[in-house]
Structures are given as C-alpha cells and as structure tokens.
Amino acid sequence: MKALIIEDEQLIAKELQFKIKSIANDVEIIEVLPSLKTAKKWFMANAEPDLIFMDIQLSDGISFELFDVYKLSCPVIFTTAYDEYAMRAFKVNGVDYLLKPIDEDDLTKAINKARVIVESKSPYPNELNKLATDMRSGSKTVQFKEKFIVNFRNQWLPVNVKDIACFCRDSLNYIYTFK
C-alpha cells in the first residue's frame, strides 16, 4: 500500500513513519507533506495514494480543506492532538481517529482497517471483470447481440452486427453500415 503523511511537525512525522514501518512493512510512505499548501500542490501533480495519515490542524490551515478542493476516495487515518474534529473526520473517508501520542496497538488496528478497505476496492466493476474472464476463457455463457432493429424511412429493419461500422449521435441517432 502506498501511503502519504500530512503532518506539519517534523519530529512527529518521523516518529509516525518509524512506527508504520515497524508495524506494517507493506505500507510504503511515498511522501511526507508539511503543510496544507504543499498537500494541495502534491494532489494536483500526483495520483491519489492508497492511504493517507493526516494531521488536522496544520500550520497553514485545517486539513479538511483538502476535501473541499479534491474528491479523495482513499481511506484516511486522522492523527491529531484535538478530539473536537472526530465527527467531521468520519464524514470524509476517516477510518480511524488517533490522538497523539499515537499508541502502536491503535495504529495497527487502524492500518488493518484501512488495508481491508483498500484490498476490497476493485478498479473495475465485478460484472466487467466477469465478462473479461469469460471472454478470455472462451466461455459460451456470454451472448452478444447479433442484430439491431433500426428505423429506416419509417420502417423497422433488422441490421446484422457484422454489417455495422459505427453509431453516431447528433440531433438524431444514426447507424452507419459497411454496405
């Protein structure tokens, strides 16, 4: 799992990094960002990580502003010294809310919760995965449309799929054939 740490206190960020490495060797910290401004720049230039460890009160603002600017869908483990933001944290992808100093057992549980969420996400819908698998295996259970019924000069005519070059849609729907 690729993870990002957003923490403005350098010593706490290093300690968190150390704890994560000792607890979960499959979690790779790709970057440690010290401010809201650098986090915004980072998200503009990079793909969303699998997991974010995020302090709430940063030196230049509150980290919830990131959710106003970017549609983040990855799980977030909030690491903060303030308990007043807990309800808000769970409204924006929060999987856990750890108060500083961070307990290793709590961190382990939070990472395991996030791992389950990350591993359950599939980049493709299940139906599409099944279709691709069936097509690769030559399964006969997959059936495709062989004809389309089209309206041509106020008549409904069948058109074989093999004769269709493309479909176009402007103000009306069109079908172009090879014939």
Image (cartoon, rainbow, N blue to C red):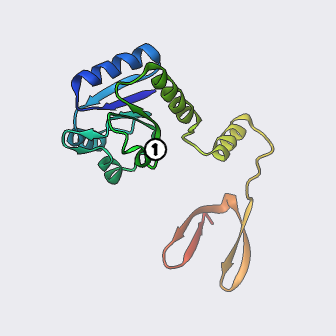
83 or 16: which is nearer to us? 83
Residue 26 pos. (x, y %): 47, 19
Q: Quadrant of the C terminus?
A: bottom right
SS for tag 1? loop
Q: Residue at x 56, y 38 (%)?
A: 121
Residue 67: x and y, percent?
Answer: 36, 49
Query: Seen from this angle, which residue lies furthest left?
Result: 60
Query: Is residue 4 placed above or below 63 in the rendered structure?
Result: above
Front residue of this view, candidates 132 and 179: 132
The residue located at (34%, 20%) in the rendering is 17
Can residue 25 be seen in the rendering of this structure? Answer: no
Rendering quarter of residue 119: top right
Between residues 144 and 19, which one lies in front from this camera angle? Answer: 19
Query: Which residue occupies the foreground of this view, 173 or 122?
Result: 122
Q: Amino acid at mark 1?
A: Asn
Number of numbered callouts drawn: 1
Residue 66 left/right relative to 87 = left
Residue at figure coordinates x 66%, y 80% from the top left: 152
Farthest right residue? Answer: 140
Question: Does residue 93 appear in the picture of this structure?
Answer: yes
**Above or below, comparing residue 162 to residue 64 in the picture:** below
Kindly identify the residue that appears in the image at 45 percent across and 40 percent down. Answer: 74
In this view, the residue farthest toward the bottom is 154
Q: Is residue 58 above or below residue 64?
A: above
Q: Position of residue 5 (x, y in %)?
A: 33, 30
Residue 14 in which image quadrant: top left
Q: Where does the image place residue 134, in percent across and percent down from the top left? A: 72, 40
Left or right for 74, reference 67: right
- Mark 1, residue position: 93
Label 1 Cα crowd, 10 Å radius (few <14 / some 14-19 / many 20+): some
